[in-house]
Amino acid sequence: KNYSIDNTAFTIFVDNTLTDLDRKVLTHCYLPIIGDKALSIYLTLFTMLDPGAQESNVLTHSQLLKIIGIPKTKFVNERRKLEAVGLLTTYYKDSHFIYVLKSVLSPYEFFNNHDLVRVLSSILGQDDLDMLAYNFLLRRLDPNQFENITVSFDGVFDAFIDTDASYHGIGV
């Protein structure tokens, strides 16, 4: 069923923030699949939340459409792309939508999602997909090939422990 966004309001819910890695995954992995308009909607919805908030104020679709500059019919199609790739969950009741912004998959999760990889491969080609996965997943240096010389807590702070506990602010 198609739910019209004419004269409707929405609220945004989120339980995460976007990291620099998330933005990189969005740009290099999701963008070729969903396109720039869907990505713009996703990022714009994030900006409509107050910093640190997990729920937005009630907003109108007319406000959102003015910001992103697309007609309402195109908005619904672009929103559906976000839903299809798992970046958005949409709820509806009594002319009010709730948009739940979902977390961006980690590079490992993304490249292990057969549906996303299949579509991305058809867009980029196998060689470019392999290079993209290589750049995201392969480390330049392998820490396991190095000696771990990290000092433990006790190794550093045992030397500071003495019999006069009050000196360290824990006594009476």
Image: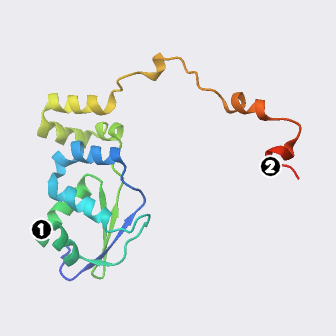
Q: Residue at x 22, y 42 (%)?
A: 28
The amino acid on which the numbered mark 1 sits, given as a three-letter code, is Ile
Which label is found at residue 104? Answer: none
Quickly name the residue at label 2: 169
Secondary structure at numbered mark 2: loop
Residue 11, image quadrant: bottom left
Q: Secondary structure at mark 1?
A: loop
Of the pair 160 and 126, the residue shown nearer to us: 160
Q: Position of residue 4 (x, y in %)?
A: 18, 76
- Give the vertical position of 95 relative to 125 (above or below): below
Residue topped by disc 1? 70
Marks 1/2: CA distance? 62 Å
**Badge 1, how many Cα within 10 Å: few under 14, some, many 20+?**
some
Please state if 165 lies on the left or on the right of 30 as rendered: right
Q: Residue at x 80, y 44 (%)?
A: 168
Q: In the image, residue 46 lies at what x, y percent? A: 32, 62
- The amino acid sitting under disc 2 is Gly
Vertical side of 128 occupied by 165: above or below: below
Q: Is residue 105 visible?
A: no
Whether residue 7 is situated above or below residue 50 in the rendered picture: below
Seen from the viewer's position, the closer of residues 156 and 22 is 156
Q: Is residue 137 visible?
A: yes
* The N terminus: image quadrant: bottom left
